[in-house]
Image (cartoon, helix red, strand yellow):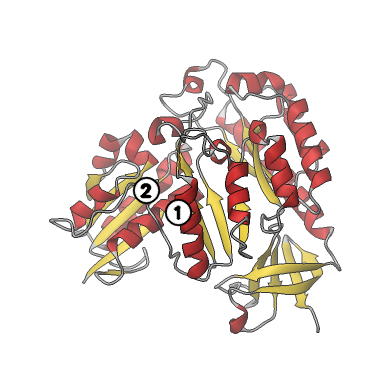
Amino acid sequence: MKKIAIATLGCKVNQYDSAVIRESLGDAEYNFVPFSRKADIYIINTCTVTKKADYQSRQLIRRSHRLNPCARIIVTGCYAQRAPQEIKEIPGVDHTVAVGDVRRIISLIDTPPRREPPPIITGNAATFPEKTRAFLKVQDGCNSRCSYCIIPYTRGRSKSCGPEETIKRILRLVAFGYREIVLTGIHLGSYGWDLKPRTTLANLIKSIENQGISTRIRLSSIEPTEFTDDLIDVIVSSAIVCNHLHIPLQSGDNEILKRMRRPYDRLFFKELVERLVSAIPDLNIGVDVIAGFPGETEESFKNTVDLIEGVPTCYLHVFPYSRRPGTPAADFPDQVGSKTIRERSKILRRLGNRKRQDYYTRFLGKRLSILVEAKRDVSTGRLKGFSRNYIPVLVNGWDNMVNREIRIKVTKVQEGNVFGALESG
Protein backbone atom coordinates (compact mmCIF):
# COMPACT_ATOMS: atom_id res chain seq x y z
CA MET A 1 0.00 0.00 0.00
CA LYS A 2 1.26 3.45 -0.89
CA LYS A 3 1.80 5.78 2.04
CA ILE A 4 0.12 9.16 1.52
CA ALA A 5 0.47 12.28 3.66
CA ILE A 6 -1.81 15.29 3.24
CA ALA A 7 -1.09 18.77 4.62
CA THR A 8 -3.65 21.56 4.61
CA LEU A 9 -3.15 25.29 4.99
CA GLY A 10 -5.73 28.04 5.25
CA CYS A 11 -9.46 28.11 5.75
CA LYS A 12 -12.15 25.57 6.62
CA VAL A 13 -12.96 25.30 2.92
CA ASN A 14 -9.46 23.96 2.32
CA GLN A 15 -9.90 21.50 5.19
CA TYR A 16 -13.08 20.25 3.59
CA ASP A 17 -11.37 19.99 0.18
CA SER A 18 -8.61 17.87 1.72
CA ALA A 19 -11.20 15.61 3.34
CA VAL A 20 -12.83 15.09 -0.06
CA ILE A 21 -9.43 14.22 -1.58
CA ARG A 22 -8.71 11.71 1.17
CA GLU A 23 -12.13 10.10 1.01
CA SER A 24 -12.00 9.88 -2.80
CA LEU A 25 -8.72 7.97 -2.53
CA GLY A 26 -10.16 5.48 -0.04
CA ASP A 27 -8.63 4.16 3.19
CA ALA A 28 -8.71 0.57 1.96
CA GLU A 29 -6.26 1.21 -0.85
CA TYR A 30 -3.82 3.63 0.77
CA ASN A 31 -2.07 3.99 4.08
CA PHE A 32 -2.52 7.59 5.25
CA VAL A 33 0.28 8.76 7.54
CA PRO A 34 0.97 12.02 9.41
CA PHE A 35 2.72 14.66 7.34
CA SER A 36 5.72 14.46 9.66
CA ARG A 37 6.33 10.85 8.56
CA LYS A 38 8.05 9.45 5.50
CA ALA A 39 5.51 8.88 2.72
CA ASP A 40 5.47 7.79 -0.91
CA ILE A 41 3.19 10.65 -1.94
CA TYR A 42 2.75 14.08 -0.36
CA ILE A 43 -0.31 16.19 -1.19
CA ILE A 44 -0.06 19.82 -0.08
CA ASN A 45 -3.28 21.86 -0.18
CA THR A 46 -2.02 25.43 -0.18
CA CYS A 47 -3.31 28.88 0.74
CA THR A 48 -2.32 32.19 -0.86
CA VAL A 49 -4.31 34.76 1.07
CA THR A 50 -1.07 36.37 2.37
CA LYS A 51 2.67 36.28 1.71
CA LYS A 52 3.03 34.31 4.93
CA ALA A 53 0.65 31.65 3.58
CA ASP A 54 2.76 31.37 0.42
CA TYR A 55 5.88 31.02 2.58
CA GLN A 56 4.29 28.34 4.77
CA SER A 57 3.23 26.42 1.65
CA ARG A 58 6.80 26.47 0.31
CA GLN A 59 8.07 25.32 3.71
CA LEU A 60 5.77 22.29 3.65
CA ILE A 61 6.88 21.40 0.13
CA ARG A 62 10.55 21.55 1.11
CA ARG A 63 9.90 19.61 4.31
CA SER A 64 8.23 16.79 2.40
CA HIS A 65 11.15 16.65 -0.05
CA ARG A 66 13.58 16.37 2.87
CA LEU A 67 11.54 13.60 4.49
CA ASN A 68 11.65 11.54 1.30
CA PRO A 69 13.61 12.89 -1.70
CA CYS A 70 12.09 10.10 -3.81
CA ALA A 71 8.48 10.88 -2.93
CA ARG A 72 5.99 12.22 -5.44
CA ILE A 73 4.88 15.73 -4.40
CA ILE A 74 1.52 17.05 -5.59
CA VAL A 75 0.64 20.67 -4.80
CA THR A 76 -2.94 21.93 -5.06
CA GLY A 77 -5.03 24.74 -3.54
CA CYS A 78 -5.11 28.48 -4.11
CA TYR A 79 -1.34 29.06 -4.27
CA ALA A 80 -1.01 26.31 -6.87
CA GLN A 81 -3.85 27.92 -8.82
CA ARG A 82 -2.28 31.39 -8.68
CA ALA A 83 1.38 30.60 -9.29
CA PRO A 84 1.86 27.06 -10.68
CA GLN A 85 5.16 27.84 -12.42
CA GLU A 86 6.61 29.39 -9.27
CA ILE A 87 5.76 26.22 -7.34
CA LYS A 88 7.12 23.89 -10.03
CA GLU A 89 10.54 25.52 -9.61
CA ILE A 90 10.75 24.30 -6.00
CA PRO A 91 12.94 21.16 -5.84
CA GLY A 92 10.90 17.98 -5.51
CA VAL A 93 7.58 19.21 -6.88
CA ASP A 94 6.19 16.79 -9.46
CA HIS A 95 2.77 18.27 -10.20
CA THR A 96 0.61 21.31 -9.52
CA VAL A 97 -3.15 20.79 -9.64
CA ALA A 98 -5.91 23.38 -9.93
CA VAL A 99 -8.30 24.03 -7.04
CA GLY A 100 -10.95 21.32 -6.82
CA ASP A 101 -9.55 18.98 -9.47
CA VAL A 102 -9.79 15.72 -7.50
CA ARG A 103 -9.88 13.67 -10.69
CA ARG A 104 -6.49 15.02 -11.68
CA ILE A 105 -4.98 14.23 -8.26
CA ILE A 106 -6.24 10.65 -8.36
CA SER A 107 -5.04 10.18 -11.93
CA LEU A 108 -1.56 11.23 -10.81
CA ILE A 109 -1.64 8.62 -8.04
CA ASP A 110 -3.53 5.83 -9.83
CA THR A 111 -2.71 5.10 -13.45
CA PRO A 112 -5.32 4.54 -14.72
CA PRO A 113 -7.61 6.09 -12.09
CA ARG A 114 -9.72 3.56 -10.18
CA ARG A 115 -12.73 5.78 -9.61
CA GLU A 116 -14.45 8.88 -10.93
CA PRO A 117 -14.75 11.36 -8.07
CA PRO A 118 -16.97 14.42 -8.48
CA PRO A 119 -15.64 17.99 -8.44
CA ILE A 120 -15.09 19.28 -4.91
CA ILE A 121 -18.19 21.51 -4.82
CA THR A 122 -20.25 18.34 -5.30
CA GLY A 123 -17.76 16.07 -3.53
CA ASN A 124 -18.87 14.45 -0.33
CA ALA A 125 -16.58 14.05 2.67
CA ALA A 126 -18.02 12.16 5.62
CA THR A 127 -14.92 11.47 7.71
CA PHE A 128 -12.66 13.96 9.45
CA PRO A 129 -9.98 11.99 11.31
CA GLU A 130 -9.54 12.91 14.98
CA LYS A 131 -12.26 15.57 14.80
CA THR A 132 -15.65 15.63 16.51
CA ARG A 133 -16.84 18.48 14.29
CA ALA A 134 -17.48 17.96 10.60
CA PHE A 135 -17.06 20.59 7.91
CA LEU A 136 -19.53 20.77 5.06
CA LYS A 137 -18.74 23.03 2.13
CA VAL A 138 -22.00 24.27 0.68
CA GLN A 139 -20.55 27.12 -1.41
CA ASP A 140 -17.30 27.95 -3.19
CA GLY A 141 -15.92 30.91 -5.12
CA CYS A 142 -16.70 34.61 -4.84
CA ASN A 143 -18.27 37.25 -7.10
CA SER A 144 -16.95 40.18 -5.03
CA ARG A 145 -13.81 41.98 -6.01
CA CYS A 146 -12.39 43.42 -2.79
CA SER A 147 -9.30 45.30 -3.88
CA TYR A 148 -6.90 43.34 -1.64
CA CYS A 149 -8.14 39.79 -2.19
CA ILE A 150 -6.67 37.21 -4.59
CA ILE A 151 -9.16 34.43 -3.79
CA PRO A 152 -11.81 35.29 -6.45
CA TYR A 153 -9.05 34.89 -9.04
CA THR A 154 -8.08 31.45 -7.75
CA ARG A 155 -11.49 29.94 -6.96
CA GLY A 156 -13.68 31.59 -9.58
CA ARG A 157 -17.29 32.72 -9.38
CA SER A 158 -19.69 31.71 -6.64
CA LYS A 159 -21.25 28.27 -6.92
CA SER A 160 -23.50 26.46 -4.48
CA CYS A 161 -24.41 22.89 -3.67
CA GLY A 162 -28.15 22.33 -4.14
CA PRO A 163 -30.36 22.21 -1.03
CA GLU A 164 -31.48 18.60 -1.52
CA GLU A 165 -27.91 17.37 -1.93
CA THR A 166 -26.81 19.45 1.05
CA ILE A 167 -29.50 17.88 3.24
CA LYS A 168 -28.41 14.39 2.14
CA ARG A 169 -24.84 15.18 3.17
CA ILE A 170 -25.90 16.57 6.51
CA LEU A 171 -27.94 13.45 7.28
CA ARG A 172 -24.95 11.33 6.26
CA LEU A 173 -22.70 13.22 8.67
CA VAL A 174 -25.30 12.83 11.42
CA ALA A 175 -25.40 9.09 10.69
CA PHE A 176 -21.61 8.98 11.02
CA GLY A 177 -21.98 10.33 14.56
CA TYR A 178 -20.95 13.96 14.20
CA ARG A 179 -22.58 16.15 16.84
CA GLU A 180 -21.61 19.43 15.19
CA ILE A 181 -21.50 20.40 11.51
CA VAL A 182 -19.84 23.61 10.36
CA LEU A 183 -21.34 25.04 7.17
CA THR A 184 -18.47 26.56 5.21
CA GLY A 185 -17.93 28.52 2.03
CA ILE A 186 -15.66 31.15 0.56
CA HIS A 187 -18.66 33.50 0.51
CA LEU A 188 -21.19 31.59 2.63
CA GLY A 189 -23.74 34.39 2.80
CA SER A 190 -24.19 34.24 -0.98
CA TYR A 191 -25.29 30.61 -0.80
CA GLY A 192 -27.98 29.77 -3.33
CA TRP A 193 -27.87 32.98 -5.36
CA ASP A 194 -26.50 31.07 -8.37
CA LEU A 195 -29.02 28.24 -8.19
CA LYS A 196 -32.23 27.87 -10.20
CA PRO A 197 -34.58 28.44 -8.56
CA ARG A 198 -32.65 30.97 -6.50
CA THR A 199 -32.51 30.32 -2.78
CA THR A 200 -30.73 31.67 0.29
CA LEU A 201 -28.72 30.60 3.33
CA ALA A 202 -31.77 31.36 5.49
CA ASN A 203 -33.88 28.93 3.45
CA LEU A 204 -31.17 26.28 3.70
CA ILE A 205 -31.09 26.59 7.49
CA LYS A 206 -34.88 26.27 7.64
CA SER A 207 -34.66 23.07 5.58
CA ILE A 208 -31.99 21.66 7.91
CA GLU A 209 -34.13 22.55 10.94
CA ASN A 210 -37.06 20.69 9.41
CA GLN A 211 -35.06 17.43 9.48
CA GLY A 212 -35.56 17.24 13.24
CA ILE A 213 -31.88 16.65 14.02
CA SER A 214 -30.26 17.64 17.31
CA THR A 215 -26.78 18.06 15.81
CA ARG A 216 -25.35 21.54 16.31
CA ILE A 217 -24.97 23.70 13.19
CA ARG A 218 -22.22 26.31 13.22
CA LEU A 219 -21.92 28.97 10.53
CA SER A 220 -18.55 30.08 9.21
CA SER A 221 -17.79 33.65 8.14
CA ILE A 222 -20.68 35.76 6.76
CA GLU A 223 -20.30 39.20 5.19
CA PRO A 224 -21.97 42.13 7.02
CA THR A 225 -24.32 43.02 4.16
CA GLU A 226 -25.58 39.44 3.90
CA PHE A 227 -27.33 39.45 7.28
CA THR A 228 -30.84 39.84 5.93
CA ASP A 229 -33.83 40.16 8.23
CA ASP A 230 -34.80 36.61 7.27
CA LEU A 231 -31.36 35.20 8.12
CA ILE A 232 -31.27 36.99 11.49
CA ASP A 233 -34.78 35.74 12.34
CA VAL A 234 -33.79 32.15 11.44
CA ILE A 235 -30.67 32.28 13.63
CA VAL A 236 -32.63 33.78 16.54
CA SER A 237 -35.38 31.16 16.40
CA SER A 238 -33.21 28.11 15.62
CA ALA A 239 -32.70 25.39 18.22
CA ILE A 240 -29.60 24.02 16.45
CA VAL A 241 -27.68 27.03 15.06
CA CYS A 242 -24.88 28.00 17.45
CA ASN A 243 -24.85 31.48 18.96
CA HIS A 244 -21.46 32.21 17.42
CA LEU A 245 -20.85 34.32 14.30
CA HIS A 246 -17.78 35.49 12.44
CA ILE A 247 -18.12 38.75 10.52
CA PRO A 248 -15.35 40.36 8.43
CA LEU A 249 -14.87 44.03 9.28
CA GLN A 250 -11.42 44.59 7.66
CA SER A 251 -11.32 48.30 8.60
CA GLY A 252 -13.21 50.70 10.83
CA ASP A 253 -12.41 53.73 8.68
CA ASN A 254 -14.89 54.76 5.98
CA GLU A 255 -12.28 55.94 3.48
CA ILE A 256 -10.24 52.75 3.80
CA LEU A 257 -13.42 50.68 3.43
CA LYS A 258 -14.08 52.47 0.12
CA ARG A 259 -10.55 51.78 -1.07
CA MET A 260 -11.01 48.13 -0.09
CA ARG A 261 -14.27 48.05 -2.12
CA ARG A 262 -16.21 46.95 0.95
CA PRO A 263 -19.95 47.74 0.51
CA TYR A 264 -20.70 49.19 3.98
CA ASP A 265 -19.44 51.85 6.39
CA ARG A 266 -18.51 51.86 10.07
CA LEU A 267 -22.00 52.90 11.22
CA PHE A 268 -23.60 50.01 9.31
CA PHE A 269 -21.23 47.54 10.95
CA LYS A 270 -21.76 49.01 14.43
CA GLU A 271 -25.55 48.88 14.15
CA LEU A 272 -25.45 45.32 12.76
CA VAL A 273 -23.33 44.00 15.64
CA GLU A 274 -25.48 45.76 18.23
CA ARG A 275 -28.63 44.35 16.64
CA LEU A 276 -27.25 40.80 16.61
CA VAL A 277 -26.02 40.92 20.19
CA SER A 278 -29.36 42.34 21.33
CA ALA A 279 -31.30 39.59 19.53
CA ILE A 280 -29.18 36.50 20.30
CA PRO A 281 -28.41 35.63 23.95
CA ASP A 282 -24.70 35.28 24.88
CA LEU A 283 -23.69 35.74 21.23
CA ASN A 284 -19.96 35.43 20.50
CA ILE A 285 -18.91 37.56 17.50
CA GLY A 286 -15.47 37.25 15.96
CA VAL A 287 -14.11 39.82 13.52
CA ASP A 288 -11.54 39.86 10.71
CA VAL A 289 -9.45 43.03 10.48
CA ILE A 290 -6.57 44.03 8.20
CA ALA A 291 -3.70 46.13 9.57
CA GLY A 292 -1.78 48.49 7.30
CA PHE A 293 -3.89 48.60 4.15
CA PRO A 294 -2.49 51.10 1.60
CA GLY A 295 -3.40 54.63 2.62
CA GLU A 296 -4.10 53.71 6.26
CA THR A 297 -2.98 56.73 8.27
CA GLU A 298 -2.63 56.99 12.03
CA GLU A 299 -6.08 58.58 12.11
CA SER A 300 -7.74 55.86 10.03
CA PHE A 301 -6.05 53.15 12.13
CA LYS A 302 -7.34 54.89 15.26
CA ASN A 303 -10.84 54.85 13.76
CA THR A 304 -10.53 51.06 13.41
CA VAL A 305 -9.36 50.63 17.00
CA ASP A 306 -12.08 52.93 18.32
CA LEU A 307 -14.81 51.08 16.43
CA ILE A 308 -13.67 47.68 17.69
CA GLU A 309 -13.38 49.05 21.23
CA GLY A 310 -16.91 50.40 21.02
CA VAL A 311 -18.82 47.39 19.69
CA PRO A 312 -19.55 44.13 21.57
CA THR A 313 -17.30 41.91 19.48
CA CYS A 314 -15.47 39.14 21.35
CA TYR A 315 -12.28 38.26 19.45
CA LEU A 316 -10.23 39.32 16.42
CA HIS A 317 -8.50 37.58 13.54
CA VAL A 318 -5.78 40.06 12.62
CA PHE A 319 -4.27 40.00 9.14
CA PRO A 320 -1.22 42.17 8.43
CA TYR A 321 -1.85 43.59 4.95
CA SER A 322 -0.11 41.44 2.37
CA ARG A 323 0.48 42.75 -1.14
CA ARG A 324 -0.96 40.21 -3.58
CA PRO A 325 0.20 40.62 -7.22
CA GLY A 326 -2.79 40.80 -9.53
CA THR A 327 -5.05 42.64 -7.08
CA PRO A 328 -5.85 46.37 -7.50
CA ALA A 329 -4.49 47.21 -4.04
CA ALA A 330 -1.05 45.89 -5.00
CA ASP A 331 -0.65 48.93 -7.26
CA PHE A 332 -2.12 51.50 -4.88
CA PRO A 333 0.16 54.39 -3.88
CA ASP A 334 1.02 55.12 -0.23
CA GLN A 335 1.77 51.52 0.75
CA VAL A 336 2.30 51.25 4.50
CA GLY A 337 5.76 50.24 5.71
CA SER A 338 6.27 46.72 7.09
CA LYS A 339 7.39 48.00 10.51
CA THR A 340 4.21 50.04 10.88
CA ILE A 341 2.10 47.08 9.78
CA ARG A 342 3.74 44.88 12.44
CA GLU A 343 3.19 47.50 15.15
CA ARG A 344 -0.47 47.98 14.26
CA SER A 345 -0.99 44.22 14.11
CA LYS A 346 0.39 43.89 17.65
CA ILE A 347 -1.96 46.62 18.91
CA LEU A 348 -4.96 44.88 17.35
CA ARG A 349 -3.93 41.46 18.68
CA ARG A 350 -3.61 42.87 22.21
CA LEU A 351 -7.05 44.43 21.83
CA GLY A 352 -8.45 41.13 20.57
CA ASN A 353 -6.92 39.19 23.48
CA ARG A 354 -8.39 41.64 25.98
CA LYS A 355 -11.86 41.45 24.45
CA ARG A 356 -11.67 37.64 24.40
CA GLN A 357 -10.66 37.56 28.08
CA ASP A 358 -13.46 39.99 28.99
CA TYR A 359 -16.00 37.83 27.15
CA TYR A 360 -14.84 34.63 28.81
CA THR A 361 -14.89 36.25 32.23
CA ARG A 362 -18.59 37.06 31.82
CA PHE A 363 -19.29 33.33 32.17
CA LEU A 364 -17.56 32.73 35.51
CA GLY A 365 -19.92 30.71 37.68
CA LYS A 366 -22.30 30.07 34.78
CA ARG A 367 -23.26 26.79 33.20
CA LEU A 368 -22.50 25.83 29.61
CA SER A 369 -22.93 22.77 27.40
CA ILE A 370 -19.67 21.76 25.73
CA LEU A 371 -19.04 19.23 22.97
CA VAL A 372 -15.98 17.24 24.04
CA GLU A 373 -13.17 17.03 21.48
CA ALA A 374 -11.27 13.86 20.60
CA LYS A 375 -7.89 15.13 21.87
CA ARG A 376 -7.07 16.12 25.41
CA ASP A 377 -5.32 19.40 26.13
CA VAL A 378 -1.56 18.78 25.91
CA SER A 379 -0.47 21.04 28.77
CA THR A 380 -3.09 20.04 31.37
CA GLY A 381 -4.22 16.57 30.26
CA ARG A 382 -7.83 17.69 30.65
CA LEU A 383 -10.66 17.12 28.24
CA LYS A 384 -11.36 20.07 25.98
CA GLY A 385 -14.73 21.03 24.60
CA PHE A 386 -16.39 23.95 22.88
CA SER A 387 -19.62 25.55 24.00
CA ARG A 388 -22.24 26.54 21.47
CA ASN A 389 -20.96 30.11 21.70
CA TYR A 390 -17.44 28.88 20.94
CA ILE A 391 -15.82 29.09 24.36
CA PRO A 392 -13.09 26.44 24.75
CA VAL A 393 -13.39 24.85 28.19
CA LEU A 394 -10.92 22.52 29.94
CA VAL A 395 -12.47 20.00 32.31
CA ASN A 396 -11.47 16.85 34.19
CA GLY A 397 -13.37 13.88 32.83
CA TRP A 398 -13.30 10.45 31.21
CA ASP A 399 -12.55 9.36 27.66
CA ASN A 400 -16.09 8.06 27.19
CA MET A 401 -17.23 11.70 27.20
CA VAL A 402 -15.61 12.33 23.80
CA ASN A 403 -18.15 13.46 21.18
CA ARG A 404 -20.77 14.02 23.86
CA GLU A 405 -22.34 17.33 24.84
CA ILE A 406 -21.92 17.65 28.59
CA ARG A 407 -22.95 20.30 31.12
CA ILE A 408 -20.22 22.12 33.03
CA LYS A 409 -19.88 25.10 35.33
CA VAL A 410 -17.16 27.66 34.53
CA THR A 411 -14.85 27.85 37.56
CA LYS A 412 -11.84 29.85 36.40
CA VAL A 413 -10.58 32.06 33.56
CA GLN A 414 -6.81 32.41 33.51
CA GLU A 415 -4.44 33.63 30.79
CA GLY A 416 -6.88 32.92 27.99
CA ASN A 417 -7.86 29.48 29.31
CA VAL A 418 -11.31 28.65 30.61
CA PHE A 419 -11.66 25.90 33.24
CA GLY A 420 -14.83 24.12 34.18
CA ALA A 421 -16.19 21.46 36.50
CA LEU A 422 -18.69 18.74 35.60
CA GLU A 423 -22.17 19.68 36.63
CA SER A 424 -23.27 17.44 39.49
CA GLY A 425 -26.46 15.52 39.21
Visible residue check, residue 284: no
Visible residue check, residue 338: yes
Q: In this image, 170 relative to 153: left or right? A: right
Q: In this image, 186 relative to 119: left or right? A: right
Front residue (pair 272, 252): 272
- Could you tell me which residue is drawn at 31 percent across and 59 percent down? 24
Q: In this image, 142 relative to 302: left or right? A: left
- How far from the left and from the top, in percent, is residue 145? 50, 25
- Could you tell me which residue is drawn at 22 percent across and 46 percent down? 95
Q: Compared to 414, does 297 lie above or below?
A: above
- How far from the left and from the top, in percent, is residue 72? 21, 56
Q: Earlier in the sequence, mark 1 or mark 2?
A: 1
Label drawn at residue 15: 1
Neighbourhood count class around disc 2 (C-alpha, 10 Å): few under 14, some 14–19, many 20 upward: many
- How far from the left and from the top, in percent, is residue 312? 80, 43
Front residue (pair 370, 114): 114
Residue furthest to the top in view is: 333
Residue furthest to the left in view is: 112
Q: Kindly state the secondary structure of the residue where label 1 is placed.
A: helix
Position of the C terminus by quadrant? bottom right
Residue type of the residue flagged with mark 2:
Ile
Q: Which residue is mark 2?
A: 120
Q: Compared to 219, does 344 lie above or below?
A: above
Front residue (pair 274, 294): 274
